[in-house]
Image: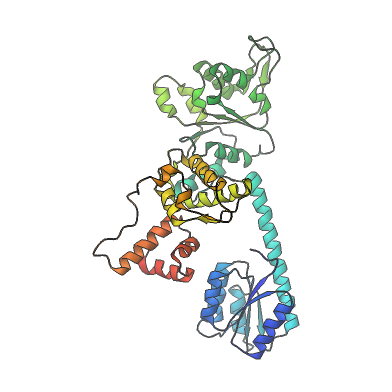
Amino acid sequence: MGISVPKVLVVDSRSRATTDLITFLKDSGYEVLWADDGETAFNILDSEIIDVMIAELHVHRINGMRLLHVAKKRNPEVCVIVITADADVELATEAMRQGAYDFQTKPLNLSKLKVVIERAVSHQRLVFEMHDLHQRIDERYGLIGIIGDTPKMVQVYAKVREIAPTQATVLLTGKTGTGKALVATAIHANSPRRDCPFVKLNCAALAESLIESELFGHERGAFTGAHKTRKSRFEIADGGTLFLDEVSEISLSTQSKLLRFLEERQFERLGGNETIKVDVRLIAATNKDLKELVAEGKFRGDLYYRLAVVLIELPELRERKQDIPLLVEAFLEEFNKRHNKSVTGVSRGVMDALMNCDWPGNVRELRNCIEGMVAFSRPACVLGVSDLPPYLREQKPSSDGFYLHVGMTMQDVEKTLIEKTHHSTGYNKEKTAEILRIGLRTLYRKIKEYQIE
């Protein structure tokens, strides 16, 4: 909510007193909107973020109490001041109980009203600052980078928040690009170890002979080329968390040593005799089926069960396509900043293409796709179909597209169009209304009328 220049909506019939009030508010530095009846006010609330609403309780068409509910729904921190020509204490009490900030009778004392508004705006600034503080804390310690609100992702969030404060070893499974490293980071960031090291080791990026040395370290002269002592990743992560990505790439001999560490929390460097004890939480990840590898004798079963104390499976993007609009919005913001661009959004055709793709590379592939489109974008543009990579432009529409056929009524067409658009935006009503070019109030009414889930 931007409140550097507070926006005030005055809802009252045309009169000299109303004109004086609007002039007074403008002279006091506020941006003022005016509605002479409830229906006009309703439409303004649908399209504007209002900081203060001054409303006559008995306004024409839609009464002030109804507007109070709508305004609070649009902006929970809005300051609503209800006014009436009658000193109705009972009505005033009811309005305050339902969320009004203040109640005043006509003729208005403009100086008193100004004090009330200033107090309310100060409160809003405090709430905004606290929200900003919580957001910055969440950026440091929260689930930043993990985006989505589909049921499968909600389950992931719940597991992360539940197990992060514990010391349990975690195994993350999922295809390449599903976000395993982000989840590992979130677990560490929400744990009591958050201020201690978070050390990563990608086992697939190292030769098999180097993984053991990286994990456990080595003494000088332990093998050819070991010219000096090297600390282990466990020592570097002492007090914190060690994240082993692609743990399936570890050899069976190294798996035995890792199992011993998990059981005893101690180890010896290669070529050394000193037993080193450390306090490290282990998070492992794999894009392979470890149970299948166990059955094939390529992975130790006892190690698998020691790693999978807590098992979190990350869904493929094709299983959570409703999150694509949210991901696209986040990636546009990220890459606009990184590449100093000003892309304002994507067209419906682009969103359809993104929703129709199966994304074998998952979120990582989508992210790379959006970055490429933003990097080559024109200033302040909406990305169109021509901006898509060739393989997305040439793909065939999926079977869940929107098709018309003879026999459909206009109601059938409208319902289907709303359903498909609502689905494509990830059930974001504001975006759905914007794409369909209808008012938010109309969309709510249509959703209710057609019983759209």
Residue 69 at least partly seen: no
Residue at image location 52% in from the left, 15% down from the top = 253
Residue 16 at least partly seen: yes
Front residue of 10/85: it is 10
Horizontal arrangement in the rendering, residue 234 relative to residue 155 (left or right): right
Q: Residue furthest left?
A: 407
- Name the quadrant containing residue 75: bottom right
Front residue of 398/28: it is 398
Q: Position of residue 324 (x, y in %)?
A: 47, 49
Q: Is residue 99 above or below residue 358?
A: below
Q: Position of residue 425 (x, y in %)?
A: 46, 56
Q: Position of residue 179 (x, y in %)?
A: 52, 39
Residue at image location 56% in from the left, 39% down from the top = 182
Which quadrant, please, contains the C terminus?
bottom left
Front residue of 274/347: it is 347
Horizontal arrangement in the rendering, residue 52 relative to residue 368 (left or right): right
Front residue of 227/166: it is 227
Total numbered labels: 0
Q: Is residue 439 above or below residue 147?
A: below
Horizontal arrangement in the rendering, residue 297 relative to residue 246 (left or right): left
- Name the quadrant containing residue 140: top right
Q: Position of residue 66 (x, y in %)?
A: 53, 77
Which quadrant, please, contains the N terminus?
bottom right
Coloring scheme used: rainbow
- Name the quadrant containing residue 161: top right
